[in-house]
Image (cartoon, rainbow, N blue to C red):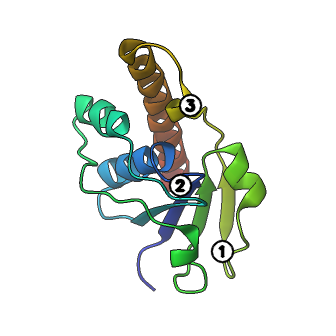
Amino acid sequence: MGKPRVLFICTGNSARSQMAEGFLRHHAGDEYDVYSAGLEPRPVNPLAVDVMREVGIDISGQTSKGVRDYLGRVHFGFIITVCTDAERECPIFPGVSIRLHWPFDDPAAAAGSDDERRQVFRRVRDEIDAAVRAWLAERRRA
């Protein structure tokens, strides 16, 4: 049957979904096949890479992908949207077992100095980490 596949989706696949993908890979090891995608993919945000590196997770090799790259091609056991736009606009994936919504602020939209923007990225990173850990704990208890 294989490992469950998880797809994290956000608008640009540049920060939130990339960080979620990195955290699930890190915390779950090889329990899941983990993917991320965006409705309108943009390059991975360098601040996302930097703040993940701060917690020992390297996402520098991850790339942005579009939702349509997977639609009808890959079956996912879980689709987790990490922003409100993605939840509202996400296409229907046939055969998805469970669809979840974890809304996080868009750190890429943060204004201010580099330090202020970095703080927003760190806050969102930590929120995503907590959500991934809680979800994994729940899944392991089930």
Which residue is at the front of the view, 126 or 113? 113
Residue appearing at x 60%, y 52% in the figure: 11
Relative to 74, say whether 49 is above or below: above
Q: Residues within 10 Å of mark 3 (few under 14, many from 20)?
A: few
Q: Which residue is mark 1?
A: 96
> In this rendering, would 67 be left or right of 4?
right
Mark 1 in CB contact with mark 3 (< 8 angstroms): no
* Outermost right residue: 88
Real-space CA distance between mark 3 and mark 2, rounded to the nearest whole angstrom: 32 Å
Relative to 92, say whether 35 is above or below: above
The mark lying in front, picked from 3 and 2, is 3
The mark lying in front, picked from 2 and 1, is 1
Q: Position of residue 66 (x, y in %)?
A: 52, 67
> In this rendering, would 36 be left or right of 79?
left
Q: Position of residue 135 (x, y in %)?
A: 54, 47
Residue appearing at x 44%, y 13% in the figure: 116
> In this rendering, would 55 be left or right of 116?
left
Secondary structure category for the residue under label 1: loop
Q: Quadrant of residue 29?
A: bottom left
Q: Which residue is mark 2?
A: 139
Real-space CA distance between mark 2 and mark 1, rounded to the nearest whole angstrom: 16 Å
Which residue is at the front of the view, 81 or 111? 111
Mark 3 in CB contact with mark 2 (< 8 angstroms): no
Disc 1 residue type?
A: Val
Residue 6's label in the rendered image is none
Disc 2 residue type?
A: Arg
Q: Give whichever of discs 1 and 3 has the lower sequence position.
A: 1
Residue 109's label in the rendered image is 3
Q: Give whichever of discs 2 and 1 has the lower sequence position.
A: 1
Secondary structure category for the residue under label 2: helix
Real-space CA distance between mark 1 and mark 3, rounded to the nearest whole angstrom: 30 Å
Disc 3 residue type?
A: Ala
